Image (cartoon, rainbow, N blue to C red):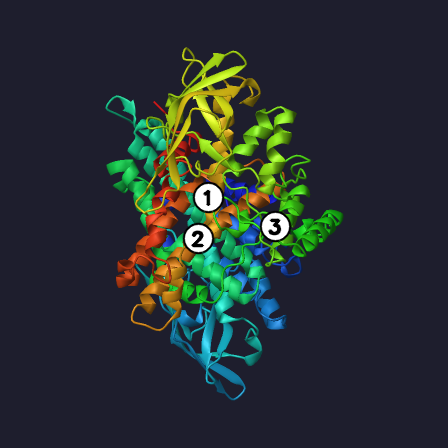
Amino acid sequence: MALGLTPEQQALSDAVGQFADRHAPVAATRDNFAALADGQLPDWWDSLVANGFHAVHMPESLGGQGGGLIDAACVLESAAKALLPGPLLPTVTAGAIALLADPAPSADSLVRELASGVPAAVVLPGNGEFQARADGERLLITGESDVTAGVCAARVVLIGARAQDGGVVWLPVDTRKPAATVEALHGTDLVCDVGILRLGDYEAAPRDALDGIDPERAEAVAVGLVASAMAGITQWCVEEVTAYLRTREQFGKVIGTFQALQHSAAMLLVNSELATAAAWDAVRAADEPPDQHRLAAAGAATIAISPIPDLVLDALTLFGAIGYTWEHDLHLYWRRAISLAGSIGPASRWARLLGQLGCAKQRDMSVNLGPHSQADSDFRSWVAETLDAALQLRNDKPGRQGDYENHATGPQRTLIAEAGLIAPHWPAPWGVDAGPLRQLIIDEEFAKRPGLVRPSLGIAEWILPSVLAGAPRELQESLIPGTQRNDITWCQLFSEPGAGSDLASLATRATKVDGGWQINGHKIWTSLAQFADYGGLLARTDLAASKHRGIGYFILDMRSPGIEVQPIKTASGAAHFNEVFLNDVFIPDDMLLGGPTDGWSLAIATMAEERSAISGYVKFDRAAALRRLAAEPGPEREDAQRALGELDAYTNAIKALGVRETIRLLDGQPSGPASSIAKVAMNVLLRRTFEATLRLTGRTGMIADSDPDVVPAYLHLPAELIGGGTREIQLNIIAQMILGLPRK
């Protein structure tokens, strides 16, 4: 999915892609490598300027297009995807940083110059050794930059020089002046020049300086735009690899049918989507407080920039030897990714920075409702009044699922349930028919009241949607209110010894008898069956039908004769799971949801709810032990900060994926693949979190009940990794249902 979420942003991206197709096909770019390395502008630069792509983020009053930084990010993403050569990225970045300056003639003059199409580059204070000293009525700047992209083509370079008082002076440098020299270097990236800018007593007037630019904010802006270009590269890789796997044949088969290649392609998509989400988050954070912008930029550097060369290498291996040839375009994207990753400095620096920041503050991933913020004020007022009333009450009993606050029962929970705010997206009277906007309003109002614990439906959250879809009204009325109060608890009777992820292979039989169905079979890995009042049961109703069609979905009273529950003690020592044996168990006809063979379609909806819920586990901090280690002085602190930064970057990317999906839904767009992608990403995140925690906590792993908790949580990890479908099954779904790779 592209960076842009609105139709206007998507149209802008399409326009850039069409421009590149017309003016800069890759074959033509290959003929101009030497000229590009010398800093010569492409022949079509004036046409690009005439379209305003380079200045889409600049004010109309200064010659720009009046858009925002996200619009510039969309341009850069699409340009990178098309391998558009030349200094577009450094020119756009220079303009974006110039716009951070306080309003003044010097800033306006520079922005106008850039909007007119003058190519530019940027040297941030940490990317050069420029010194500015006062000499009478003038400033003299001396020093040189580090390796800088676009500096050979640039006519103006915006530099951050160190002043004599230790501050930073931002100045535009005219590279045509004798005191400025540029040395072109043999660059890794073949479509954009790199070089070093040297200044020898370069003369500038104090009035030329741009005031008010925060160096950290400027760096964050630059990182966000580099990440946007990287997002375009990853998207190109996904599309090209997918197209290749659909057509290339080996051993008499299309290679896209090979499961190993399907899984690799699916992971390519997962990583691309996370990179795009992190880049988007870094760009949108430019309008947020500086600390939030810094967090988002560090996350983008860690997840959307530094790992991308290796992602492109993964794509190359999927092409095989052909992808390693000079003739194939992939190496041009690989080189560009390597160069862009290098441009932001060492990856470890950004991960460590994010880890340091993450010890004190977390990325705010709340959804900015924008024009929707004032909508539905009456509904918001009602929600606020309801929750304020709930705050005056208390729950007085623990739930049978365990001593968890969100399962507690009592007056407070009852009030929230009867108001329809436990599952607000459900239809009345069980919910309030809340669409995406109203759901966000409810989320915000709960968040304003940290002392009010939001009730959970637990396993019932995955089952009751099927009850709503397939049960008669009378059954809904007998089951849903009690469940919302947590007077009724549930289990899910899906998996069997021979039918786990391959659920359609289940063997539990449902035989039609007078007044109902007789059930015989064996279920396994059933959470909380020992406490459940009811279970959602799948059983085979028609042996002659195909395996997906001959399945019924039943509501089973767990107190029925013929049910035997045997706990399964896991490696953690606990017995969260159970085997359930069903011997001639009778289920009345009115406990069948839908028709006798509607079970598979209802189950798919249930599993979608489950996968969505499991993906939502990202809201829980699994790195608490690592966060403590990173915050306290000690020999492992720096390593812990770096590891924590890498984990927080991945976590924030998953959260950003969810925020983007929410915004799309608010805009009336259909649901995308975010749930399946987040499920795989959560699997990766959990493995990485505990691997890093064990690696850095050392002897704490020798204690079963340490503070902070390390081993018990790790021993429970398989339940989370396997629940809702293994990673491999999810990769199959992504490869076949999202990427469209062939099954056979």
The amino acid type, in three-letter code, at marker 2 is: Thr
Quadrant housing the C terminus: top left
Which tag, 2 or 1, sits closer to the chain's start? Answer: 1
Q: Is residue 136 left or right of residue 189?
A: right
Using the rendered view, name the quadrant where residue 150 is placed.
bottom left
User: Badge 2: few (under 14), some or many (20 or more) residues near its Cα, within 10 Å?
Assistant: many
**Badge 2 element:** helix
Q: Looking at the image, do the residues carrying marks 3 and 2 touch, with CB atoms under 8 Å apart?
A: no
Residue 672 in view: no
Q: How far is the residue under mark 3 from the one under mark 2?
A: 20 Å
**Percent coordinates x, y for residue 499 in the rendering:** 36, 27
**Percent coordinates x, y for residue 429 in the rendering:** 68, 36
Residue 687 in view: yes
Name of the residue lying farthest toward the right: 378
Q: How far is the residue under mark 2 from the one under mark 1?
A: 11 Å
Q: Is residue 318 above or below residue 100?
A: above
Q: Is residue 236 above or below residue 444?
A: above
The amino acid type, in three-letter code, at marker 3 is: Asp
Q: Is residue 232 left or right of residue 47?
A: left
Residue under the point 59% across and 27% down: 469
User: Badge 3: few (under 14), some or many (20 or more) residues near its Cα, within 10 Å?
Assistant: some
Query: In the image, which is nearer the foreground, mark 3 or mark 2?
Result: 3
Q: Which residue is mark 2?
A: 651
Q: Which residue is mark 1?
A: 615
The amino acid type, in three-letter code, at marker 1 is: Ser
**Percent coordinates x, y for residue 566 in the rendering:** 36, 34
Q: Looking at the image, do the residues carrying marks 2 and 1 touch, with CB atoms under 8 Å apart?
A: no
Q: Which residue is mark 3?
A: 443
